[in-house]
Image: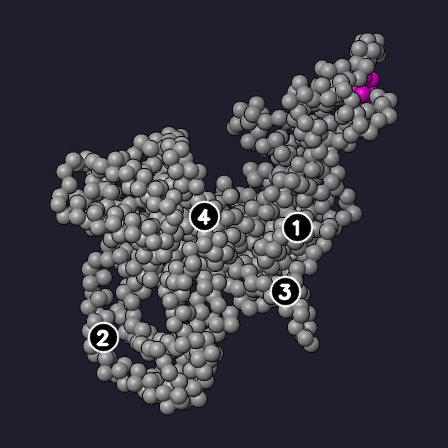
């Protein structure tokens, strides 16, 4: 929002700046400490100095913006340190001041908050593009919000002041910033129960994005109000009279009209102006009394009653909702107390006492979800947007604790939401396990959750995460936990494999010593130190065959290789390799779900194929078909970048399981018949199949087979691969 430098400030702007400064100082003096007042004076001095010659596109001095944001923070009732941080929120982004400078002058908390609210620009790293800048900026912002929720309020009010001043910006920036506000900041405000802030943001976006439709909407709402006002007043009078006749005193009964913000995504004519009525009473007991009176005096619409007093929505909303027929018209009724209404409009800001801990506790559910996103490097902004805009469902533990998940979340998400160990060994769950006399319903881990149900997770210590679990979860937290578990499994598997190889080598050389004890021998420890290896890392690299064991042992003379070397010259190489083994060892795959194995997506090898292995990311072995084009003539550099590993299948032919075949084919007549004929000729039954058309006259086919052994499955795949119309085939 910066423009060209300017040394002149108008009298009007000087007056405005003085008024804003005085308002902020009065607030901090009343609600802060003497230390806060010192920090405030320092911050005002700093922004005067560093923003002195900067102007906004509107022509106003730039300093007015941080002052207005700080005033909004004051009006929200937030604490004095947040007011000071609001003043400084743009100083790193728009001046030469750095995180280090803020840390030195104000302290680490201020430095981290201000840095968290600062955009990341391509000048910081020319190797990343604008999209990556945006994602990196949001990652930084999310971390700041999670560490201290007050950063979120500064950002919301910063954006609100910018939106109020947006008309002076170029049209393309108006649209970009408005769309970002609508897709990011509005949902965040809604999720935090800040309805008034959310509605103002939305209306400003509507006005900037669709100015003609916005004006048309205002006119339509005004015309409908004029046409309906008599009927609405009659309905309101009937409600007042009914409650008064039953000796219930109300604070207010007001009609709820369609808000212009609700029409931003609706490009159709407004067909109604009355959303319903809000009945405001003294306390929660009066809420239920009012509900009883209305239900005994009016016709009630079935299945439309919602009790958000006993079970508040997770964003803090409280109240009763119902639908009645008043004067023959179906009407929504919201019943709230005075305190509930304040909280529903302004969130915790309606009544909080200034404790940052209270803020964090109030929004802990939301922040715990963002915390997982903030800590996950691979999470893109798309996932954050998906989360903040998704509908939420509330479920309970057997002890009655409420957990909130995005719509579509599963039992596995619930398990990971409680503890990573529960998720890692989740078999399923019992639904409503403590209900008296109810049958305990057991469900699978991929089954979706429903609002209001309680679940008890059923675990099995023999169950561990596999790649397919990613398809069974909805939340970023679950994906993070699954990814961590899989990485750990790969590490453990590699270490175990390395330990077995080392143990065999020691035994073959007549060393009767456990691996752990051998690793503690001084000469071995010295060799590991020279190579900058821990014992675990050494075993892992051996298991992955990244570090040839024989070569390592010979290099550091950890076995009697001198004598062995003379023996080799005497008896020849063929006998030597049979007795002592090569530098390479074959890794036998005993299970296709082996966490150490990664199946290449270029050639999709299956048990029975001739295969070649390569070290992938130092943590797993990527297997290809031996004749895969990627590792031969079409990509000669591939082998030079990868460490080759000897691999082979060692899966029992007696074990049977159900297989699923996926095929990408060129669409045409008789294709499905040819495919199913090959399967039936092999004597295998098809459990079910699905076909879906794609672009470029192609189709995807999914076929689930009965339980068979891998040699039978391999025979089927080999024949399917010969079909000319098959482009890709995998399990």
Q: CA distance from mark 3 to mark 1?
A: 18 Å
Label 1: how many Cα within 10 Å (few below 14, some 14–19, many 20+): some
- Which mark is nearer the camera, 4 or 2? 4
Question: What residue is at 34 percent from the left and 42 percent from the top?
Answer: 38
Residue 325 in the image, given as x and y percentages of width and height: 37, 85
Q: Find out whether the residues at labels 4 and 2 contact each other: C-beta distance under 8 Å.
A: no
Label tally: 4
**Marks 3 and 1, the one that precedes in the sequence:** 3
Helix, strand or loop status at disc 4? loop
Q: What residue range appears in magenta?
A: 573-580
The residue that mark 1 highlights is 421
- Residue 148's label in the rendered image is 4
Helix, strand or loop status at disc 2? helix
Q: CA distance from mark 4 to mark 2?
A: 45 Å
**Marks 3 and 2, the one that precedes in the sequence:** 2
The residue that mark 3 highlights is 399
Q: Is residue 385 in view?
A: yes
Q: Find out whether the residues at labels 3 and 4 contact each other: C-beta distance under 8 Å.
A: no
Question: What residue is at 27 percent from the left and 81 percent from the top?
Answer: 232
- In the image, is 569 to the left or to the right of 441? right
Task: Between residue 455 and residue 60, name the one nearer to us.
Answer: 60
Q: CA distance from mark 3 to mark 2?
A: 50 Å
Query: Where does the N terminus fall, quadrant-wise?
Result: top left
């Amino acid at each position: 929002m910066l423009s060209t430098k300017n040394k002149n400030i108008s009298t009007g702007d000087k007056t405005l700046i003085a008024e804003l400064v005085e308002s902020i100082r009065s607030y901090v003096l009343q609600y802060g400490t003497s230390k806060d007042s010192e920090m405030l004076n320092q911050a005002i001095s700093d922004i005067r100095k560093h923003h002195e010659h900067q102007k906004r596109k509107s022509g106003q001095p730039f300093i007015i913006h941080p002052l207005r944001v700080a005033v909004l923070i004051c009006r929200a009732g937030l604490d004095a340190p947040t007011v000071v941080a609001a003043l400084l929120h743009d100083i790193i982004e728009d001046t030469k001041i750095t995180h280090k400078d803020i840390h030195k002058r104000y302290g680490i908390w201020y430095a981290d908050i201000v840095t968290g609210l600062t955009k990341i620009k391509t000048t910081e790293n020319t190797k990343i593009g604008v999209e990556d800048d945006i994602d990196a900026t949001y990652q930084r912002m999310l971390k700041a919000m999670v560490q201290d929720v007050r950063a979120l309020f500064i950002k919301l009010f910063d954006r609100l002041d910018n939106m109020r001043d947006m008309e002076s910006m170029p049209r393309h920036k108006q649209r970009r910033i408005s769309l970002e506000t609508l897709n990011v900041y509005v949902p965040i405000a809604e999720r935090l129960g800040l309805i008034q802030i959310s509605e103002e943001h939305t209306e400003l976006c509507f006005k900037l994005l669709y100015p003609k439709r916005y004006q048309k909407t205002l006119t339509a709402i005004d015309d409908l109000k004029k046409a309906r006002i008599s009927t609405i007043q009659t309905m309101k009078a009937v409600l007042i009279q009914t409650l008064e006749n039953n000796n219930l005193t109300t604070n207010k009964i007001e009609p709820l009209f369609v808000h212009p913000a609700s029409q931003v995504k609706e490009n159709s004519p407004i067909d109604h102006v009355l959303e319903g009525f809000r009945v405001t009473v003294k306390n929660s007991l009066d809420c239920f009394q009012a509900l009883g009176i209305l239900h005994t005096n009016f016709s009630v619409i079935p299945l439309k009653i919602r009790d958000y007093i006993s079970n508040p929505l997770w964003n803090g909303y409280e109240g009763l909702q119902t639908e009645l027929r008043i004067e023959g018209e179906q009407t929504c009724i919201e019943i709230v107390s005075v305190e509930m209404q304040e909280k529903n409009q302004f969130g915790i800001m309606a009544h909080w006492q200034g404790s940052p801990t209270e803020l964090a506790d109030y929004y802990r559910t939301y922040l715990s979800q963002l915390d997982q996103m903030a800590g996950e490097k691979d999470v893109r902004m798309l996932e954050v947007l998906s989360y903040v805009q998704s509908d939420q469902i509330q479920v309970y533990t057997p002890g009655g604790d409420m957990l909130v998940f995005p719509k579509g979340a599963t039992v596995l998400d619930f398990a990971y939401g409680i503890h990573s160990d529960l998720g890692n060994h989740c078999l399923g769950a019992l639904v409503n396990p403590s209900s008296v006399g109810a049958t305990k319903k057991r469900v699978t881990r991929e089954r979706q959750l429903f609002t209001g149900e309680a679940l008890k997770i059923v675990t099995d210590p023999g169950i561990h995460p596999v790649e397919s679990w990613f398809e069974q979860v909805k939340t970023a937290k679950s994906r993070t936990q699954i990814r961590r578990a899989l990485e750990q499994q790969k590490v453990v598997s590699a270490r175990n494999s390395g330990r077995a190889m080392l143990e065999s080598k020691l035994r073959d050389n007549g060393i009767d010593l456990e691996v752990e004890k051998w690793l503690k021998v001084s000469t071995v420890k010295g060799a590991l130190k020279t190579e900058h290896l821990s014992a675990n890392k050494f075993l892992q690299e051996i298991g992955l065959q990244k570090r040839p064991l024989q070569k390592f042992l010979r290099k550091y003379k950890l076995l009697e290789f001198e004598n062995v070397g003379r023996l080799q010259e005497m008896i020849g190489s063929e006998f030597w390799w049979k007795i002592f083994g090569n530098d390479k060892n074959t890794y036998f795959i005993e299970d296709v779900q082996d966490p150490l194995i990664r199946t290449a997506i270029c050639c999709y090898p299956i048990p029975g194929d001739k295969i070649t292995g390569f070290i992938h990311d130092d943590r797993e072995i990527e297997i290809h078909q031996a004749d895969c084009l990627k590792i031969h003539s079409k990509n000669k550099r591939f082998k030079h970048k990868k460490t080759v590993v000897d691999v082979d299948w060692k899966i029992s032919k007696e074990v049977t399981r159900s297989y699923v075949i996926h095929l990408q084919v060129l669409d045409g007549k008789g294709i499905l018949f040819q495919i199913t004929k090959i399967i039936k000729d092999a004597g295998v039954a098809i459990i079910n199949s699905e076909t879906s058309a794609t672009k470029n006259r192609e189709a995807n086919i999914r076929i689930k087979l009965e339980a068979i052994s891998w040699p039978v499955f391999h025979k089927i795949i080999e024949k399917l691969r010969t079909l000319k119309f098959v482009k890709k085939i995998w399990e």
